[in-house]
Image: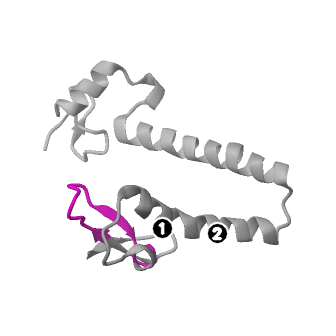
Amino acid sequence: MVASDKKTLLGKEKVIVHYENRDTPDEMPLEVFSQIATKEESNDTELREKWVTPVAEKILVLVTEAEIRKRDIEYLMGVKVTESLNVNARRAYEKLLGKDRDDLTMMDFEEMLRGEVKLIRDKNYDKKRGKGTG
């Protein structure tokens, strides 16, 4: 685990966690790391449960405290949260790639995988040529 230079939305510290059995590290809030870190070996499913369960508990406390009805909780989680995630993902794709994710073609994916397309966030992006310049 090493400190990250990024912060959470609320300004809390984040860390980068490297795993012995995985090439890709996770970046997570230090508070989450403290809750899920163990000396025992864990698989991805066990880590996910440790990571997500405290969040689910906080959500349940919020909806209990607000006395939200069961049908409204289902609407909240099944519609409103999903809708919000989809809107944010769509905006991120458009910002990152220069077009809506639904407008991406298989050729776009192939070019991205081969490194032939620079992302729109490249500060030196040349829209006419469709390539980054540095």
- Residue at the extreme left of the image, as rendered: 134
Mark 2 closeness class: few <14, some 14–19, many ≥20 residues within 10 Å: few
| Residue 112 falls in image quadrant | top left
With respect to residue 103, does 11 lie above or below?
Answer: below
**How far across and down, in percent of the image, does residue 124 sit?**
21, 43
Residue 18 pos. (x, y %): 24, 66
Magenta part of the chain: 16-33
| Residue drawn at x 47%, y 66% as measured from the top left | 51
- Tell me the residue that label 1 is attached to: 50
The residue identified by callout 2 is 57
Q: Nearer the viewer, residue 28 or 21?
A: 21
Tell me where residue 103 sits by quadrant: top left
Q: Position of residue 99 (x, y in %)?
A: 41, 30
Q: Residue at x 45, y 77 (%)?
A: 35
Under circle 2, the secondary element is: helix
At label 1, the amino acid type is Lys
Position of residue 104 relative to residue 5, above or below, is above
The picture places residue 106, in percent across and down from the top left corner, at 32, 20
Q: Earlier in the sequence, mark 2 or mark 1?
A: 1
- The alpha-carbon separation of the residues under discs 2 and 1 comes to 11 Å
Q: Is residue 69 left or right of residue 128?
A: right
**Label disc, if present, on residue 100 of the rendered structure:** none
At 52% from the left edge and 73% from the top edge, which residue is drawn?
A: 10
- 6 in magenta: no
Q: How is the image coloured?
A: one colour
Across the whole image, how many numbered discs are drawn on residues? 2
